[in-house]
Amino acid sequence: MQKIKENVETKYEHLSGLNGLQVKDLKKVTGADFSKGPSSVSRAIKNPMSSVPSKGPVSSCLKANDHLLFDIDSDDIWIKFKLIIEAPGNQYVEANFDVKFDKQMTGD
């Protein structure tokens, strides 16, 4: 699972730097023939799936060209903000920013 986590962080930059990033609920798509065209999540989820054990060697349950679906989770949550300020003279100032919060954070 650690290798999958590293590959996900490398391929999807917006996931790198998240604290406690983990892959969970790993499933292998079964009964699908992806050799007839490009694979997609929408095609994959229409097929039966089997859970992949989180312990033991991957080679015991996965082989080359298997298609996997999984959820990811982290200790952090990102919130996207869009701030639009109307200035005099029909002018607008727009700012977009992301804020990262710890999921366990509480307020007073």
Image: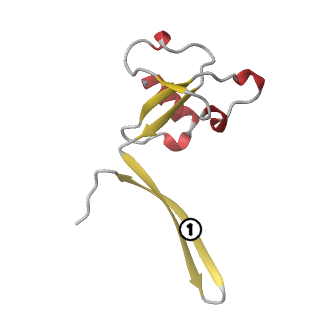
Q: Residues within 10 Å of mark 1 (few under 14, many from 20)?
A: few
- Quadrant in which residue 91 is drawn: bottom right
Counting from the top left corner in percent of width and height, residue 78 is at 45, 53
Give whichever of 51, 98 is nearer the camera: 51
Q: Quadrant of the C terminus?
A: bottom left
What type is the residue that disc 1 sits on? Ala
Quadrant the N terminus occupies: top left
Count of numbered tags: 1
Which residue appears at 28% of the width and 55% of the height?
105
Work out which residue is located at the far right of the displayed protein and give it. 36
x and y percent of residue 107 in the render? Answer: 26, 63
Lateral position of residue 19 relative to residue 61, left or right: left
Q: Secondary structure at mark 1?
A: strand
Quadrant of the image occupied by residue 53: top left
Per the image, the residue denoted by label 1 is 95
Instruction: Specify the farthest residue to the left.
Output: 108
Tell me what residue is drawn at x 33 percent, y 51 percent. 103
Q: Is residue 102 above or below residue 69?
A: below
Which of the 4 image quadrants contains residue 73?
top left
Place of residue 54 in the rendered image (x, y in percent of width and height, measured from the top left): 39, 22
As drawn, 105 above or below 2: below
Q: How is the image coloured?
A: secondary structure
Query: Could you tell me which residue is drawn at 35 percent across and 44 percent down?
Result: 75
The residue shown at (53%, 44%) is: 14
Q: Nearer the viewer, residue 59 or 31?
A: 31
